[in-house]
Image (cartoon, helix red, strand yellow):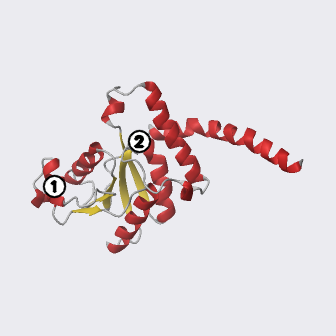
Amino acid sequence: MRRWRRWAVAVLVLPAMLLAGLPGFLGATSAPPADRAQRADAVVVLTGGAERVRTGLELLEDGAAPRLLVTGAAPGLTITELARAHGRDPATLAGRVTLGHAAATTVGNAAEVAAWTRAQGLAKPKLRIVTAGYHMPRALLELRRAMPEAELLPHPVTPAILRDGEIPWTRAARLYGGEYVKYAMALAGLTTLAPARESQRR
């Protein structure tokens, strides 16, 4: 009987907790970028959309940071290919842009970024993080776990499909709802239950 009661409480309480945290999550997904005047040690792009890489390159060129890491880049992608895809001269990115190919999940992104910052000799890095707004809360959570010493400056990007209103509201609701569930799982320490690979549309 006691075990049944515990399960009953869990069934009732967990959905209520999820609903209670949803407004805060949605508010975090729509937060504006950190002040551009705050110069960072590096710009870090978590791949998943062309707008993110383009934004990262623009921040690099504007002097937001002296270097750029693209974590979770497609296997085999080179600096030359990335530069040409975004209308840049590869020579201007040489020595300033690093492509990380090891990550396939947000947890993997965090591990890759942590390893890269250590390799760069950044003991207490200040990083400007570029990813989609709906992915930002989970990205920051995992990055802080991997690098508690780092200062993270969020720089969310709104994908064109959301910005231009081209996506049906039902699909947008599934996108945000699915991401919120992933964020809640990560918050509860259940990251190991996530898929081995994540959609490139995180």
**Between discs 1 and 2, the one toward the N terminus:** 1
Secondary structure under the numbered disc 1 in the rendered image: helix
Q: Quadrant of residue 167?
A: top left
Q: Residue at x 31, y 62 (%)?
A: 101
In front: label 1 or label 2: 1
Residue under numbered circle 1: 81
Q: Residue placed farthest to the right in the image?
A: 1
Q: 10 Å neighbourhood of mark 2: few (<14), some, or many (≥20)?
A: many
From the viewer's perspective, is residue 199 above or below residue 160?
below
Q: Residue 65 at what x, y percent from top left?
A: 27, 58
The amino acid at mark 2 is Gly
Apparent side of residue 120 relative to residue 78 in the rendered image (left or right): right
The amino acid at mark 1 is Glu
Circles 1, 2 touching at the beta carbon (< 8 Å)? no
Q: Residue 142 at what x, y percent from top left?
A: 49, 57
The quarter of the rendered structure image containing the C terminus is: top left
Q: Residue 201 at what x, y percent from top left?
A: 37, 44
Apparent side of residue 177 relative to residue 96 in the rendered image (left or right): right
Q: Residue at x 84, y 45 (%)?
A: 5
Q: How many marks?
A: 2
Apparent side of residue 94 relative to residue 113 in the rendered image (left or right): left
Q: Quadrant of residue 112?
A: bottom left
From the viewer's perspective, is residue 125 above or below residue 139?
below
Residue under numbered circle 2: 133
Marker disc for residue 115: none
Does any portion of residue 149 appear in the rendered image?
yes
Secondary structure under the numbered disc 2 in the rendered image: helix
Does any portion of residue 148 appear in the rendered image?
no
